[in-house]
Image: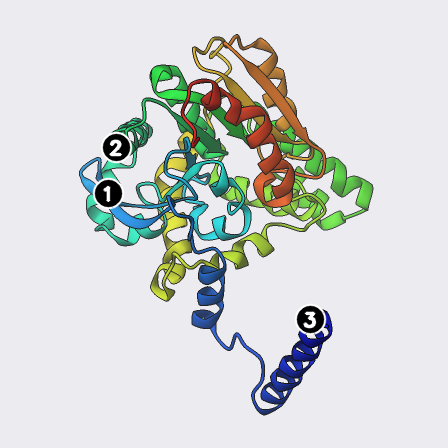
Amino acid sequence: MKMLIFGFLSVVIAGASTTMQAAEPPGPHDRAEATHIIAELRRVVADNGVERLEKVRIGGIDQWVSIRGSDRRNPILLMLHGGPGWVSMPTSWYFQRGWEEYFTVVQWDQRGAGKTYLANDPATVAPTMTRERMIADAEEMVAWLRTTFGKKKVYVLGHSWGSYLGLELARRRPEWLHAYIGIGQISNAPESERRGWAWTLKQAQQDGNAQAVAELEALAPYAQGDEAVALDSLFQQRKWLNHYGGMVHNRQGGDAEAAAMALSPEYSDHDVAGIWKANEFSMEHLLAGVLTLDMTSVRRLKTPLFLFLGRHDHNVSAELAAEWFKTVKAPKKKLVWFEQSAHEVMIEEPGKTLITLVQDVRPIAERAGDVAP
């Protein structure tokens, strides 16, 4: 009888809803409504949860962080975004929610990127946009998190450009880390560029794409030696690499991922409008140097190492990262292939990313007693 009553009430409510919808088109009607819906769905309501969006003084400037988790006693996972300047905070509403049940997840807009770019005078920040300053910022951020949450160690996850910062943290501050996790891991950037160009040219030739073949061949010899690739040549190569799914598997580029940034509850309209200006600023000051990086001399780490590699990643060669991984000695190491991903693993395969973090990575903190009881 109760089930019949419930069913009847459901019909009544549905009918009332239909009547209201007939009078007014269903929402969301604008960005404010959309982001409010997302914010409410992901609002942290757990008894011991944490949900913070704030500026932190790091490296002498204000830098924005989002800190979210269902239990503040869980291990901290700091994500270092890619780019330089390709912030992950504004897409984290999509891929991160499950992580927050097992980790306290920190998204950080780095110096010159996202909300942090908008919080400071670009003219003042520009001279400080160096790799060493970015590494120092990352060290300060980890130190701040350890102090703020009373943690001896944290996890660091580096994506793409962030994998350079993360690997440097693992080298320099192993005693601060439960483990380092690399996604889209940089190994030998010049060789990665050469392999990416060759793969893209092959796709274009097989596709009979005369325009792509001509534009790519015009770049030859591409990424020769250890000198930085000219940015106009890089962007030309990336145009076609993205077209053939080297950045996002079976998609022509990252348009869907970029569009998702506009739905971020952490970002105001002003913040969203500034994302690309900040991205250009970061690339202008850091990208040329990134293209010369060779991390293959790193052969030993004193902290556990995990690589999450997209099988189809040609934006930052996964094949090359796997070759480097074989040469590294670490207390524990594991490489996990994501067969349906390219460069955006956490967005392309969010379920497998979550399961891998929980089953393979989190046990290190569990053994150290750094988890909620």
Q: Judge left or right: residue 369 versus residue 363.
A: left
The residue tagged 2 is 144
> x, y (%) of residue 146?
29, 28
Please report contact status of discs 1 and 2: CB closer than 8 Å, yes or no: yes
Q: Is residue 364 visible?
A: yes
> x, y (%) of residue 195?
64, 28
Quarter where residue 76 is shown:
top left
Precedes in sequence: disc 3 or disc 2 = 3
> x, y (%) of residue 73?
38, 34
Residue placed at 62% from the left, 50% from the top? 253
Q: Is residue 244 above or below residue 286?
A: below
Residue placed at 45% from the left, 34% from the top? 161
Residue placed at 25% from the left, 32% from the top? 144
The residue tagged 3 is 2
The 10 Å Cα crowd at callout 1, few under 14, some 14 to 19, many 20 or more, is some
Please report contact status of discs 1 and 3: CB closer than 8 Å, yes or no: no
The residue tagged 1 is 56
Q: Judge left or right: residue 52 versus residue 365.
A: left
Query: Three-letter amino acid code at disc 3?
Result: Lys
Closer to us: mark 3 or mark 2? Answer: 3
Give the secondary structure at mark 1: strand
Q: Nearer the viewer, residue 280 or 228?
A: 280
Give the secondary structure at mark 2: helix
Q: Is residue 25 above or below residue 356?
A: below
Q: Is residue 272 above or below residue 172?
A: below
Quarter where residue 165 is shown:
top left
